């Protein structure tokens, strides 16, 4: 794990510890929070066309989207820490699996799921 990411996790844990919030951060609760924050991110785009999204982001919407993305990442980091998953290693492993499931020769330009290629 990169030093920057570990510094962020350490800051999150300190922030949480100072407020005695560990009691609220059980894996189930963190999983729920990830979904709730992802829904808030999605809400930023709800009912907007591609052009409306472009204008929204250019006209100040990038700030709220940035905050919602940060919230999702914060809960992902807290959950991975809580259950002992090295998140960077997990992502690298998943990329390798996806490369096997979606070879360029079959998947390029296609949105089909791997079992339909």
Image (cartoon, rainbow, N blue to C red):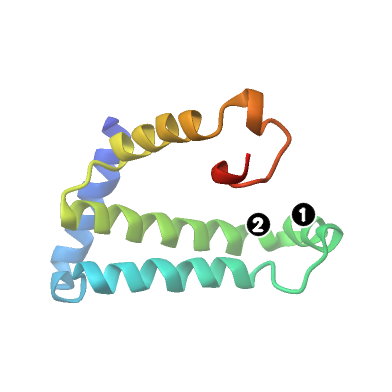
Q: CA distance from mark 2 to mark 1?
A: 7 Å
Say few, some or many: other residues with alpha carbon within 10 Å of mark 2 (under 14 / 14 to 19 / 20 or more).
some
Return the x and y of residue 53 as percentages of the image width and height.
77, 60
Return the x and y of residue 13 as percentages of the image width and height.
19, 56
Say few, some or many: other residues with alpha carbon within 10 Å of mark 1 (under 14 / 14 to 19 / 20 or more).
few
- Find the residue positioned furthest to the top: 105
Q: Residue at the location (49% across, 35% down)?
A: 101
Q: What element does badge 2 sit on?
A: helix
* Callouts 2 and 1 close, C-beta under 8 Å: yes
Q: Is residue 98 above or below residue 16?
A: above
Q: Residue at the location (54% across, 72% down)?
A: 40
- The residue wearing badge 2 is 62
Closest to the observer: 28 or 2? Answer: 28
Give the quadrant of residue 116: top right
Q: Residue at the location (30% across, 52% down)?
A: 77
Q: What element does badge 1 sit on?
A: helix
Q: Which mark is residue 17?
A: none
Closest to the observer: 81 or 63? Answer: 81
Q: Is residue 115 above or below residue 101?
A: below
Q: Residue at the location (73% across, 57% down)?
A: 57
Return the x and y of residue 2 as percentages of the image width and height.
29, 30
- Find the residue positioned furthest to the front: 116
- The residue wearing badge 1 is 58
Q: So how many labels did they put on this image?
A: 2
């Amino acid at each position: 794990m990169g030093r920057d990411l570990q510094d962020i996790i350490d800051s999150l844990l300190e922030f949480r510890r100072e407020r005695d919030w560990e009691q609220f951060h059980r894996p189930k609760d963190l999983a729920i929070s990830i979904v709730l924050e992802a829904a808030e991110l999605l809400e930023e785009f709800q009912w907007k066309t591609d052009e409306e999204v472009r204008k929204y982001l250019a006209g100040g919407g990038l700030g709220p989207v940035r905050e919602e993305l940060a919230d999702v990442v914060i809960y992902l980091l807290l959950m991975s820490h809580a259950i002992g998953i090295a998140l960077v290693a997990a992502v690298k492993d998943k990329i390798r699996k996806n490369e096997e499931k979606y070879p360029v020769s079959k998947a390029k330009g296609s949105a089909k799921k791997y079992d339909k290629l």
